[in-house]
Image: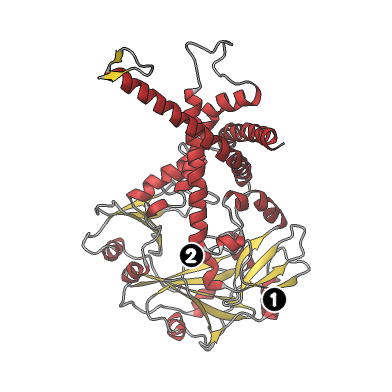
């Protein structure tokens, strides 16, 4: 028999359970309120910074070198008699496996081959005699920088190994760099690899300024932290994970304090006034935006490695390239007839087939040196080597952008081939139909990630054209920013009351 809380008449077991659950619920809400209140004081500022920096990133992305910018710096390609061929250059580079590609371009006034391994390693060899070349001569790199269309009063700013704009790991095979200012009105600076002599990045004064208000705070992209990829990833995951907890607790508390019928004695749906009321009611709308952006941002860090890599591993790429490949055909005289503004020739292998493409000004790559596009049947057979035991994939030709093949800051190459495998992960491989080059890998987890990250973080579900997308994103960001700012005011007032 169970007695009521005040003694006396016995109470039913159900009543005791109801009272216990009610008390537990009140205590849980109390702890939830305390956690949200004190963590929210810190994270309201974080949320405000994320929303403001996200708005900046809608218009100014992190600095990178586009293909058009890269080509603009390339000098005309000179092909003197007596040059060695790409196969001899590959032998001189002494790679143990097949290359990712071989680029024939200029370093100063001399032609060179830049041989790239599947692991990202790059070696430069002379196209005249095959000797290895280090492109670190400052005077030579200054001459390379002078080819830039914006070059005015070119100034050597010294050697750089790591800085704010070259901290991503994709630059590791190219370090160290020579930093050069072009002296133009835009304040352009070039980063040239001292290993290969290539221009690998350009930044302008405007990009550098706005990124301190955009990508740097948004991604917590501080150089010492970002230089340690594992540590940076853990920091972002933990910060965004706690932020999710703050947002979820706020949403639960907001719903628990909302009264539609019956209303509070004041006739209002909220017990709060002023900024607290704005935070409460605005949070029920803006909190959705808050959760949407934070959860999708957290997922972008691939927690627990839920999402697969965007490219096959080096061993699979080596199988696809082919171990017994035919030699490249290369006739310098024939190459010079292809176009009047020849900048570079790129040699690749796919399914054992050598392919050469000429880069002429800003025009699309052209077939070069007698090579032809790989046969689709041969490509399908070679693609089967990416996943032994799964069989050859079905090839689909994609002529226009779709929900899974589209550009963000620039248009993706089209057309492409989509190789559709019947493996348990439902893997797709996108590749260039003219060269057979693999452009990306996407399985079921990546397609889910596309919607959970890109869909939620940039609201590209319907691929809205601009300026409609700007309006929708602006409203969604403003809703989340309202929650953050009202939370900041409430938190500041509470701190002043408590600590004077």
In the figure, is residue 337 to the left or right of 418?
A: right
* SS of the residue under disc 1: helix
x and y, in percent, of residue 108 in the image: 64, 79
Q: Nearer the viewer, residue 20 or 380?
A: 20
Question: Nearer the viewer's eye, disc 2 or disc 1?
Answer: 1
Q: CA distance from mark 2 to mark 1?
A: 28 Å
Q: Nearer the viewer, residue 112 or 493?
A: 493
Q: Nearer the viewer, residue 99 or 284?
A: 284
Q: Is residue 402 visible?
A: no
Q: Is residue 115 above or below residue 48?
A: below
Q: Quadrant of residue 435?
A: bottom left
Q: Check disc 1 and report the residue beneath it.
A: 143
If you read the primary sequence from the N terminus, does the residue marked by circle 2 or circle 1 appear first? 1
Labels 2 and 1 touching (C-beta < 8 A): no
Q: Check disc 2 and report the residue beneath it.
A: 366
Q: Is residue 421 visible?
A: yes
x and y, in percent, of residue 488 in the image: 64, 36
x and y, in percent, of residue 60 in the image: 63, 49
Q: Quadrant of residue 349?
A: bottom left
């Amino acid at each position: 028999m169970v007695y009521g809380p005040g003694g006396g008449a016995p109470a039913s077991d159900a009543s005791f359970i109801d009272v216990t659950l009610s008390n537990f619920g009140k205590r849980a809400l109390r702890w939830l309120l305390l956690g949200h209140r004190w963590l929210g004081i810190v994270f309201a500022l974080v949320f405000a910074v994320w929303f403001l920096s996200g708005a900046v990133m809608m218009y100014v992305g992190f600095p990178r070198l586009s293909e058009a910018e890269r080509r603009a710096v390339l000098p005309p390609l000179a092909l003197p008699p007596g040059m060695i061929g790409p196969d001899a250059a590959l032998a001189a580079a002494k790679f143990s496996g097949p290359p990712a590609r071989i680029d024939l371009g200029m370093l100063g006034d001399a032609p060179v081959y830049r041989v790239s391994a599947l692991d990202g390693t790059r070696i430069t060899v002379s196209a005249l005699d095959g000797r290895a070349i280090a492109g670190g001569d400052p005077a030579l790199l200054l001459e390379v920088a002078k080819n830039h269309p914006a070059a005015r009063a070119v100034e050597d700013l010294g050697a750089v190994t790591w800085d704010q704009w070259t901290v991503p790991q994709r630059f590791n095979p190219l370090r160290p760099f020579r930093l050069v200012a072009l002296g133009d009105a835009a304040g352009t600076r070039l980063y040239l690899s001292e290993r290969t002599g290539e221009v690998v990045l350009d930044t302008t004064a405007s990009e550098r300024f706005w990124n301190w208000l955009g990508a740097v705070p948004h991604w917590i992209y501080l150089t010492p932290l970002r230089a340690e990829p594992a540590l940076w990833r853990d920091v972002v995951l933990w910060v965004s994970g706690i932020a999710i907890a703050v947002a979820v607790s706020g949403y639960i508390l907001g719903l628990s304090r909302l009264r539609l019928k019956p209303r509070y004695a004041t006739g209002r749906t909220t017990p709060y006034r002023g900024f607290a009321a704005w935070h409460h009611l605005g949070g029920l709308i803006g909190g959705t935006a808050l959760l949407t952006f934070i959860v999708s941002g957290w997922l972008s860090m691939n927690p627990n490695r839920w999402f697969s890599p965007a490219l096959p591993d080096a061993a699979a790429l080596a199988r696809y390239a082919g171990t017994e490949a035919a030699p490249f055909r290369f006739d310098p005289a024939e190459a010079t007839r292809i176009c009047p503004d020849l900048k570079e020739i790129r040699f690749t292998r796919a399914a054992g087939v050598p392919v050469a493409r000429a880069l002429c000004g800003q025009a699309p790559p052209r077939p070069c040196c007698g090579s032809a596009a790989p046969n689709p049947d041969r490509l399908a057979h070679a693609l089967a080597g990416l996943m032994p035991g799964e069989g050859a994939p079905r090839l689909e030709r994609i002529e226009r952008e779709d929900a899974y093949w589209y550009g963000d800051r620039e248009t993706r190459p089209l057309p492409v081939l989509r190789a559709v495998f019947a493996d348990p992960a439902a893997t797709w491989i996108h590749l260039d139909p003219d060269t057979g080059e693999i452009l990306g890998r996407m399985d079921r987890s990546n397609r889910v990630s596309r919607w959970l990250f890109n869909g939620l973080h940039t609201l590209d579900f319907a691929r809205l054209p601009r300026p409609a997308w700007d309006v929708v994103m602006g409203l969604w960001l403003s809703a989340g920013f309202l929650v953050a700012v009202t939370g900041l005011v409430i938190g500041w007032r509470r701190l002043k009351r408590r600590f004077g």
